[in-house]
Amino acid sequence: MTSSRRPDASSVEQLRAHFEESARVKRAFAEAGAEAMARAAALVIEAFRAGRKVLLFGNGGSAADAQHIADEWTGRFRRERPPLPALALTANTSDLTAIGNDYGFEHVFARLVTAHGKPGDVALALSTSGNSPNVLVAVAEARRLGLVTIGLTGKGGGKLAAEVDVALVVPSDATERIQESHMTFLHALCEMVDEALFPAPAPA
C-alpha cells in the first residue's frame, strides 16, 4: 500500500545536496583528470587490441567495482561483441583466503598478479586512499613483471599515485564520492573500448 504522506522537506534537501555534491566532485575530477583518463583509456584499448588482458583489484567497495567492470568486459557493456579478457583478482574467495592465510593479506593480489600477469597486460588498481598495502604490493609486482599500471585513487593520491604509469586522483576526501567518480570513469572507459575496438557500422 502506497503512503500518501509527503516526504519531509529536510529529507528532500538532504537528497538534493547528496546529488549536487556528487556531481560537483565528478565535474572537478573530469576537469583535472581528463587527459590522464584519456591516456589510461588508450593503454587499455592498446592492450585489448594486442590480445592482452586487464587485471583489476581493490578492497571493499573497490573490490566490487573491480568485479563490476571485469563483468562489463567479459560479458558486454552496451553493444554485442566478443568477450574481452578481464579478470577481477578479488572474485575467488579460495584464492584470497589461502594466500592471505599462507602469505599474509598484503600479498593476496600480488600472488595473483604473478600467476596471471604477463608483460603488456594492464593492472588496474583501485584504492580510495592510495595507501592500501595489498594494492601497493601488487602494483610493485605488476611493474616488476612489465605490466602497464593504472591507479584509481583519491584523498591526494596517497602512495599509489607515484607508483603507477597513470594516476587518476579524485579531488575529494570522501570515500563515497571517490568511488562514485571512479565508477563514472570506468563506465566511460567501457564505452571508449567498445567504440575503439568494435565500431558501429556506418549507416547504409
Image: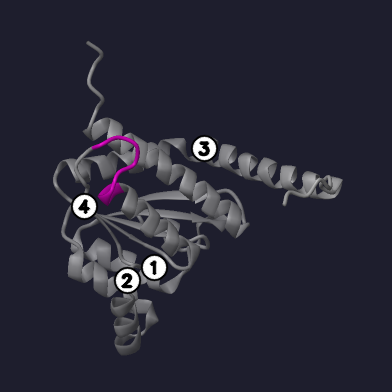
Q: CA distance from mark 4 to mark 2?
A: 18 Å
| Type of amino acid at the residue the image marks with label 3 | Ala
Pointers 4 and 1 in contact (C-beta within 8 Å): no
Judging depth in this view, the residue of 156 and 14 nearest the camera is 14
Give the residue at mark 1.
135
Earlier-in-chain disc, 3 versus 4: 3
| Type of amino acid at the residue the image marks with label 4 | Pro
Q: Which mark is residue 109?
A: 2
Residue depicted at x 33% and y 48%: 72
Q: CA distance from mark 2 to mark 3?
A: 29 Å
Give the residue at mark 3.
30
Judging depth in this view, the residue of 21 and 135 nearest the camera is 21
Earlier-in-chain disc, 2 versus 3: 3
Pointers 1 and 2 in contact (C-beta within 8 Å): yes
Query: Which residues fall within the magenta stretch?
Result: 73-80
Residue depicted at x 51% and y 37%: 30
